[in-house]
Image: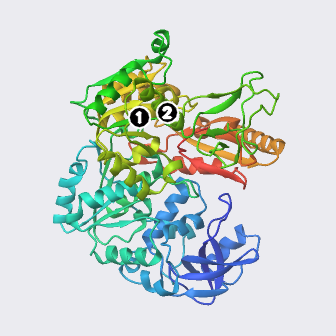
């Protein structure tokens, strides 16, 4: 009789055992697939080790107070999960404190265990990773089967230019391909992938993303495994491919927020790329127009934008004092008119959808809010409706205040629809013909990449058109270059209570500056450091100052943030659960060893949107010691951190290194 250690491919709370043991009459190889009982359900699981019962009898007598079950069915005796897949899943589970089974399901391809594709993993990528204990080997912990050693990759950082961006990587790609090795170019979005597919078409690249069908995915999987695909471009899902002879990983636009998964496991493609590079012993190139502040600790030289000095900061307070109450400053008006007369294109950047930010009653001060969320309802002109941009609730635009019955309802703030109305008024007032106006926002394009690209193409060939754009514009930054970009209200980019707000503001202005010959930034706060330095193109100066501030307050990269989130429809239950857990964590930190005392427990506090989709939301922030030492992951620190996180009960969401703290 043998004891088989199995990773169940199901959600098992992270504070419970992630590897379960079962009886079987014969040993099974690591990577084999079985069906096991988990509670009342029968689910698939992946074998990570087998041991003769004689060798484990003493261990089980000491530590196990329950009886083991038999494996229900052996689905595949042949290994169809590789050692590298198991190692990646284990790393994701440890670093991001996510259920191991969920991590492994994420790593496995979507066609895995489908009838037509069952043999897909029976070749080189399994046999080459049969490390650790075999089926008849004995002794040691069951966790030793997931203890593959890997090298810390050599990482090179680049600050890239948007113009002819493909040239930034060309030499490295050429050299790697000449050495008969594969290159994986990691992109954050499909739009960037399409750009590189066109730019590098002479290399016959393949592109992989979650949009592919099983058949298409399987074809690319085979081509990568056989070595036929040499340049592979893909989103973060491509990091799970079975590379035959990987020579280089390029992480494009490493500061892009889309690299962080918003579903469990909440992993970062940037960090995962480092792991995959380490497993394969290859170099990583990480690049961005504006690198993350966390990355700038290990990067010494940054380019400052040159030949692009024509940036103007307009103080809108002075505009009002001068009698200009328009949303467009006098400088921006003149530049728009000159552009149109010369047949040149203009982009107006408005980071808000809809007509305005919210509606307020001038009599009682009541702001119309969503019935399901604490977010304000946003008026939309086209549908004459109010929308919640968090839960998609929609209701007709009211004529009277629902709080006091007053008719004095006023629009506050500037959305993309109001910008268009003001633009039409401006041209009517001057008697000039309004040029063709294009929209680039999720309301008009429905987040369809093809529709967005069509809008961009029509605008770029319009000869004097005006594009009103939200943040979607940044997804197409490699395609767009115009004579003039105007930021209508730079203040809306920073009024967020998050420690990354200044960095986000700087990145947006700096990137827009890279896309235009002339940039005009309208703001009520012209002395803001991020606005001034981004307008000057002073990346190094901003990075230095931001790092000093973060070091003083022990913010990342000098610490690691972990956000714990609890949601419940009962506000009292949500608050009490958050308070109880916070007190338990604080007590554990107080009475534990010196190393854990470096952990700060912040909160609990209601989330910035304290009720969302009918659920009340509370956050607890853990600020722990940085888990990296000289850019190398410190496994001991992660182990200590995870021991503390084991106190977090089921029902809580754990987000390691969250994009936003609020």
The answer to whether any part of residue 640 appears in the image is: yes
Task: Estimate the x, y position of residue 203 in percent, counting from the top left.
Answer: 21, 66
Task: Estimate the x, y position of residue 257 in percent, counting from the top left.
Answer: 47, 46
Q: Residue at x 34, y 29 (%)?
A: 336
Callout 1 secondary element: strand
Residue to which mark 1 is pinned: 348
Marks 2 and 1 close (CB-CB < 8 Å): yes
Q: Of tags 2 and 1, which is closer to the observer?
A: 2
For the image, the number of numbered tags is: 2
Residue 306 is left or right of residue 608, and the answer is left
Please name whichever residue, 450 or 547, is drawn nearer the observer in this view of the structure. 450
Q: Residue at x 64, y 87 (%)?
A: 73
Residue 273 is left or right of residue 352, and the answer is left
Please name whichever residue, 606 or 125, is drawn nearer the observer in this view of the structure. 606
Please name whichever residue, 250 or 470, is drawn nearer the observer in this view of the structure. 470
Quarter holding residue 366: top right
Quadrant that contains the N terminus: bottom right
Task: Estimate the x, y position of residue 656 in percent, counting from the top left.
Answer: 56, 47
Q: Does label 2 or label 1 sit earlier along the sequence?
A: 1
């Amino acid at each position: 009789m043998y004891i088989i250690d199995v990773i169940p491919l199901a959600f098992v709370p992270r504070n419970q055992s992630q590897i379960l043991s079962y009886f079987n009459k014969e040993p099974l190889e690591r990577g084999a697939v079985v069906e096991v009982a988990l509670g009342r359900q029968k689910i698939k699981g992946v074998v990570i080790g087998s041991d003769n019962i004689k060798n484990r009898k003493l261990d089980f007598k000491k530590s196990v107070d329950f009886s083991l079950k038999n494996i229900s069915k052996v689905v595949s005796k042949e290994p169809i999960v590789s050692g590298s897949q198991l190692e990646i899943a284990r790393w994701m589970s440890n670093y991001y404190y996510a259920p191991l089974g969920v991590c492994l399901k994420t790593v496995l391809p979507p066609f895995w265990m489908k009838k037509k594709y069952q043999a897909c993993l029976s070749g080189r990528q399994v046999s080459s990773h049969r490390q650790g204990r075999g089926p008849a080997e004995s002794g040691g912990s069951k966790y030793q089967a997931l203890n593959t050693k890997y090298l810390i990759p050599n990482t090179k950082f680049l600050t890239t230019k948007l113009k002819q961006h493909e040239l930034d990587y060309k030499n490295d790609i050429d050299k790697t391909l000449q050495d008969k090795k594969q290159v994986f170019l990691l992109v954050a979005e499909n739009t960037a992938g399409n750009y590189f597919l066109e730019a590098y078409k002479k290399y016959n690249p393949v592109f992989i993303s979650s949009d592919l069908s099983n058949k298409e995915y399987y074809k690319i999987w085979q081509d990568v495994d056989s070595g036929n695909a040499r340049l592979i471009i893909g989103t973060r899902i491509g990091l799970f491919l079975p590379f035959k002879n990987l020579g280089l990983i390029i992480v494009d636009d490493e500061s892009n927020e889309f690299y962080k998964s918003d579903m469990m496991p909440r992993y970062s493609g940037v960090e995962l790329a480092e792991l995959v590079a380490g497993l394969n012993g290859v170099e990583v190139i990480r690049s961005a127009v504006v690198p993350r502040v966390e990355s700038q600790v290990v990067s010494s030289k940054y380019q400052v934008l040159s030949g692009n000095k024509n940036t103007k900061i307009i103080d809108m307070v002075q505009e009002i004092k001068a009698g200009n109450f328009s949303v467009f400053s006098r400088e921006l008006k003149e530049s728009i008119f000159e552009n149109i007369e010369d047949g040149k294109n203009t982009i107006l950047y408005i980071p808000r959808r809809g007509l305005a930010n919210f509606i307020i009653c001038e009599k009682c001060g009541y702001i119309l809010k969503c019935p399901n969320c604490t977010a304000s309802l946003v008026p939309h002109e086209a549908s004459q409706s109010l929308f919640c941009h968090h839960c998609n609730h929609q209701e007709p635009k009211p004529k009277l205040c629902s709080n006091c019955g007053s008719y004095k309802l006023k629009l506050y703030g500037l959305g993309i629809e109001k910008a268009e109305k003001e633009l039409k008024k401006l041209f009517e007032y001057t008697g000039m013909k309004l040029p063709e106006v294009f929209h680039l926002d999720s309301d008009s394009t429905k987040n369809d990449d093809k529709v967005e690209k069509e809008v961009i193409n029509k605008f770029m060939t319009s000869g004097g058109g005006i594009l009103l754009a939200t943040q979607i514009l940044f997804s197409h930054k490699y395609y767009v270059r115009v004579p003039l970009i105007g930021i209508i209200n730079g203040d809306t980019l920073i009024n967020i209570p998050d420690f990354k707000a200044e960095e986000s503001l700087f990145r947006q202005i700096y990137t827009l500056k890279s896309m235009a010959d002339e940039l005009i930034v309208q703001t009520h706060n012209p002395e803001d450091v991020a606005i001034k330095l981004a307008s000057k193109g002073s990346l190094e100066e901003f990075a230095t100052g931001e790092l000093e501030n973060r070091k003083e307050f022990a913010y990342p990269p000098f610490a690691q943030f972990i956000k714990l989130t609890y949601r419940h429809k009962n506000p009292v239950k949500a608050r009490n659960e958050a308070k109880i857990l916070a007190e338990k964590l604080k007590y554990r930190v107080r009475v534990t060893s010196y190393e854990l005392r470096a952990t700060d427990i912040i909160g609990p506090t209601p989330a910035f949107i304290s009720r969302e989709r009918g659920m009340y939301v509370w956050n607890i922030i853990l600020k722990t010691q940085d888990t990296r030492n000289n850019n190398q992951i410190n496994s001991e620190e992660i182990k200590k951190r995870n021991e503390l996180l084991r106190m977090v009960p089921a029902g809580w969401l754990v987000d390691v290194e969250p994009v936003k703290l609020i």
